[in-house]
Each structure stands twice: as structure tokens, then as C-alpha cells.
Image: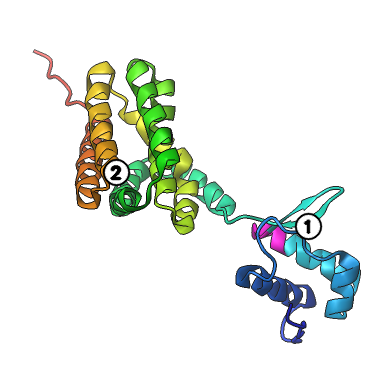
Amino acid sequence: MKPAIIKAREPLHREVARILSERIISGDCPERSLLPTERELCKDMGVSRTVIREAIKFLESRGLVRIERGRGTVVQEPHAGPLTETFKLLLRRRGDVLKDLVEVRKILEVGIAGLAAERRDENHLRGMEQALETMRQKPSAPEGYVDADVAFHAEIARASQNPVVLVLLEPLADLLRESRLITFSGPRVVKLRTRQHEQVYKRIRAGDAAGAREAMSRHLTDTERDLLRRQTPAPRRRRP
């Protein structure tokens, strides 16, 4: 591990946090590993325990570490907790954010489907199959169908085997579920959407990246149309 070099250009605990962040990002402190103890960090950095504790709190607020009682400070896996709260707030403040969400999904998930076709393994395919089976069994149950829909797309993201993809999509999870509940249109439309999911799955299973992207694009375009239809108020009838 590289020796610590403290620069007195910002609050001391922030500088210590910067050094520890660099160690985490560089892999010197791997995911799920424990940071050195407070005593060891004090000796390494040449600072007090108070400074170390403030630095650890700062790292925890940024989602880089978590403090476990009786164990110590654990290096956190990449996640998007703060962004998740931001997106939840956005959903409450803006009613039209779901339309924006579908646009983002078309940008991201079409490419993700292509990566999934190139990189998926048997475990990913089994996860997609299980989600599809639930969709087929619950075409009239919004909660059951929507949860399976979300699980299907999440499995595609995992099949891309790109950790950045997972971090990007994690804060969108609640919004994605909300958009699917809004566009839920009953068994007839659900069966059509399930067939579209099956087409995406077939192309991924076949390793057909171009076909997977095309099938996902078609599915999301129809989803966008459903959302716009549900959000557009019906015209008022004139009284005779």
C-alpha cells in the first residue's frame, strides 16, 4: 500500500478521505475487504482518531464504505444509493418524468440487450426463463406481472456483465416499476408484451446481438406508446 501523503489544502478529514478513496478505487482496498483499524490509520496518516472517524463518516456518506458493528469498516460494492433517493424525489416532483425515463431506457437497454446476447451464460438465461414463466402465469395480476417484468430486464442487465450498467440502472428501479404499473393494460396487452419479451430472450439465447437490440427497441417503442396513451386524457364529450 502506498504511503499516505497529506496535503494541507482542505479540511484534514477530507484529505484523509481522498487518500482512502484513491486506495479503494485503485483496488489497494478491494470490495468487501476491511479497512485498517483506526489505530493503524492514525499511525499511517499521522492524524488523530477524530480525523479518521470524520473521514470514515465522509466515505460512508458517499457509499464507498459501510460500518459494521463488531467487525469494522467494510469497503462497499459499487451502488447508487444517493442517486436512488434523487430519482425518487424527481418522480414525486415531476409527473412527466416517466416519459423521460422511457427515452433513457431506449438509449441504455437496447445496447444492453446486445451485450447480453454476446456475454450471457446459463445462469442468466435461467433467470430470464423464470421471469418469463411468471409473466405467463400472472397476466391479470399487476403486481406479479410487473415484478417479473422488472426481474427480466434486471437479468438482462446482469447478463451484460458490465458493473457500470448495474450501477446506472439501480437508481432507476423504482421508476421502472412505477412506469410498468402505469402502462399495465390487462391480459390482452400483457400477453402481447410477454411475446415481445420472449423475442428478446430468444435473440439473447441465440447470441444474436443485432436481433436482441432490434427486439428490445421494438418492445420499448411500444411501451412508450402505451405510456403516452395512458397519460393523455380522453376528450370530453359535448352535451347534446
Image: magenta residue range: 59-64
Q: Which is nearer the eye, 67 or 35? A: 35
Q: Evaluate whether residue 47 shows in this view.
A: no
Residue furthest to the top: 240
- The local crowd at label 1, few if under 14, some if 14 to 19, many if 20 or more residues have their Cα within 10 Å, is many
Residue furthest to the front: 122
Q: Residue 64 vs residue 91: left or right?
A: right
What is the three-letter code of the residue carrying label 2?
Ile
Q: Residue 47 vs residue 175: left or right?
A: right
Colour convention of the picture: rainbow
Residue 229, numbered circle: none
- Residue at left 27%, top 23%? 190
- Residue at left 43%, top 54%? 165
Residue corresponding to mark 2: 204
SS of the residue at dot 2? helix
- Residue 124 image position (x, y, % from top left): 42, 40
- Residue 196 image position (x, y, % from top left): 23, 33
Q: Residue 179 vs residue 14: left or right?
A: left
Based on the displayed image, in which of its 4 quarters is residue 107 positioned? Answer: bottom left
- Residue at left 20%, top 47%? 211
- The local crowd at label 2, few if under 14, some if 14 to 19, many if 20 or more residues have their Cα within 10 Å, is many
Residue 131, compared with residue 238, is above or below; it is below
Q: Which is nearer the eye, 208 or 27? A: 208
- Residue at left 30%, top 44%? 99
Residue corresponding to mark 1: 73
Contact flag, marks 1 and 2 (Cβ < 8 Å):
no
Q: Evaluate whether residue 151 shows in this view.
A: yes
